[in-house]
């Protein structure tokens, strides 16, 4: 099949060959199965197939095994003979070893090019999900984003958001009149969550230069789609950060890409491994957002493939949109497992040749029960399938080989160096410094006025006059009178001048209270 990805099939005990049609590849898909049943190899051969057809791929590598896509397989590999035997069995005539163009990415910048986004681009909804905030805390976070936007304070990294929250806490009385109550205890709770995120490495993710989506959607000189591999072994130590990042990336693709309808092949295929992390304890608003993205992003030419151990991990409304399916073996040791197995079997179009539930339970490693969309988007009949062998290396490449690929990438200079331009943190720090300087100047002026008043009082006492009395004054010489009047006029002029000036206005209305309005 020229316009498709060969998945497997064939053999006397198996059905027809299974092809994933490129013109229906943006209708999304599911790869499911218990641990150790072959999901990683299935991901590898799907990435190979899409890349060979000029379709870029983005996928997370949880164990490091997918890095082998960058290196061709070898006849010296211990599974070489089983692979060639299987290729012959399923009629894979074009089977040969080869490598594929790979770009490595890493949120922490260790095993790939750094991936960053700004706090503003992530938005309050996803950050609230990331920090596991309560409804009241999420409301305060929304206020912080709103005020920052109105006051021209860019939120780029975590220290910007932390500074913005500090300002909200200090000015909660004024801001609460417009946006609602801002409890300092809730602000403190958000700050503590941000500290935990920072300790988990989240500070590396927020900042600039931010990821440019077109860098994920490239082809090489031979027309092969670039395979973008996210190093996720360390990232899985912060599973909520992992899930939130992938959801953010999907949302960005949805918002930025233009409508293309039903293209001949996808513009990008996105694999969402360990998909259950996205939905565990997720609020309804977030699940609704995922459903919306999954439903509409196919019109942007993006195919989304969820990888999980059990189809039951995916909400039913989203599961119903996954037309292309590869189901590896499910184990049924408990009543809940048996129920999930039965429900998984019921989602397939039945094949009279075998019982689907039994087949899902009995298929071996490297085998699967598959169903691909056919013409007009009709689900294909379920088939027992031998998954084709990979052409690239099975297993990880060495750190030296990874480093060589990263160093040769034209994206290395673009993303390696972190930028730190002026943003909310620097602007608020500057305003605080200006306020402190103004307060210090006001105090100095007040001290000068006090000194002048003391000098004037001392002069009045010297001439025998009591300050503040309206009774008759002692006799003074004209020279003394002119001296006292000149001093009084000087003090009055200084007072009037200061009250008319910038410092005087700040004293009258309060320095910190009017700081934002005076920017």
Image (tube, rainbow, N blue to C red):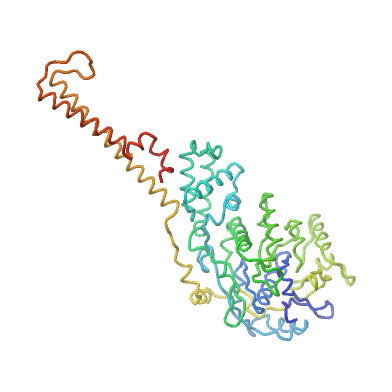
Relative to 188, 223 lies left or right: right
Give the answer, above or below, for where 211 lies relative to 72: above
Q: Residue 427's x, y, as percent?
A: 41, 50
**Snapshot quadrant of residue 63:** bottom right
Q: Residue at x 18, y 26 (%)?
A: 456
Q: Residue at x 58, y 43 (%)?
A: 139
Relative to 233, 320 lies left or right: right
Callout count: 0
Nearer to the camera, 286 or 464: 464
Nearer to the camera, 449 or 60: 449
**Snapshot quadrant of residue 87:** bottom right
Relative to 447, 175 lies left or right: right
Relative to 129, 112 lies left or right: left
Q: Residue 425's x, y, as percent?
A: 43, 51
Q: Residue 393's x, y, as percent?
A: 62, 78
Nearer to the camera, 156 or 346: 156
Q: Residue 276's x, y, as percent?
A: 68, 58
Question: For the view shown, which residue lies furthest in the top direction?
Answer: 471
Give the answer, above or below, for where 376 lies relative to 457: below
Quarter of the picture holding the N terminus: bottom right
Give the answer, above or below, for where 380 lies relative to 185: below
**Snapshot quadrant of residue 88:** bottom right
């Amino acid at each position: 099949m020229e316009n498709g990805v060969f998945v497997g099939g064939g053999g006397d005990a198996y059905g027809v060959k299974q092809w994933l049609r490129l013109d229906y590849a943006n209708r999304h898909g599911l790869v499911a199965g218990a641990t150790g049943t072959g999901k990683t190899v299935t991901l590898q051969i799907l990435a190979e197939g899409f890349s060979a057809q000029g379709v870029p791929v983005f996928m997370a590598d949880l164990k490091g095994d997918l890095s082998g896509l960058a290196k061709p397989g070898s006849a010296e590999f211990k599974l070489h003979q089983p692979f060639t035997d299987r290729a012959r069995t399923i009629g894979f005539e074009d089977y040969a070893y080869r490598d594929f163009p790979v770009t490595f990415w890493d949120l922490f910048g260790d095993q790939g090019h750094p991936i960053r986004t700004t706090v503003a681009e992530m938005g309050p909804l996803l950050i609230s999900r990331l920090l596991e905030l309560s409804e009241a805390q999420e409301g305060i976070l929304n206020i912080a984003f709103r005020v920052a936007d109105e006051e021209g304070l860019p939120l780029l990294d975590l220290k910007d958001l932390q500074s913005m929250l500090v300002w909200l806490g200090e000015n909660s009385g004024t801001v609460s009149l417009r946006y609602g109550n801002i409890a300092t205890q809730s602000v403190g709770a958000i700050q503590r969550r941000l500290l935990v995120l920072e300790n988990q490495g989240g500070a590396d993710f927020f900042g600039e230069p931010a990821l440019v989506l077109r860098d994920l959607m490239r082809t090489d000189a031979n027309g092969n789609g670039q395979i973008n591999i996210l190093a996720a072994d360390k990232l899985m130590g912060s599973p909520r950060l992992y899930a939130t990042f992938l959801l953010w990336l999907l949302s960005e693709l949805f918002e930025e890409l233009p409508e293309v309808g039903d293209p001949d092949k996808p513009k990008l295929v996105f694999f969402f491994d360990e998909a259950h992390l996205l939905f565990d304890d997720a609020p309804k608003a977030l699940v609704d957002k995922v459903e919306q993205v999954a439903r509409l992003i196919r019109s942007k030419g993006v195919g989304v493939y969820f990888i999980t151990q059990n189809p039951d991990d995916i909400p039913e409304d989203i599961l119903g949109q996954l037309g292309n399916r590869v189901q590896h073996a499910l184990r049924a040791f408990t009543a809940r497992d048996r129920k999930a197995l039965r429900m998984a079997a019921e989602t397939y179009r039945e094949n009279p040749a075998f019982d689907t539930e039994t087949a899902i339970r009995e298929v071996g490693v490297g085998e699967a029960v598959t169903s691909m969309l056919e013409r007009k988007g009709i689900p294909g009949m379920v088939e027992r399938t031998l998954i084709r062998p990979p052409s690239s290396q099975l297993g990880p490449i060495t750190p030296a080989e990874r480093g060589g690929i990263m160093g040769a990438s034209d994206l290395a200079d673009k993303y390696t160096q972190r930028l730190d331009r002026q943003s909310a943190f620097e602007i608020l720090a500057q305003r605080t410094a200006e306020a402190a300087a103004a307060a210090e100047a006001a105090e100095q002026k007040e001290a000068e006025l006090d000194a002048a008043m003391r000098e004037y009082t001392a002069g009045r006492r010297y001439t025998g006059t009591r300050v503040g009395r309206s009774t008759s004054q002692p006799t003074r010489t004209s020279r003394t009178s002119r001296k006292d009047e000149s001093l009084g006029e000087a003090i009055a002029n200084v007072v009037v001048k200061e009250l008319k000036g910038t410092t005087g206005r700040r004293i009258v209305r309060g320095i910190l209270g009017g700081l934002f309005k005076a920017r």
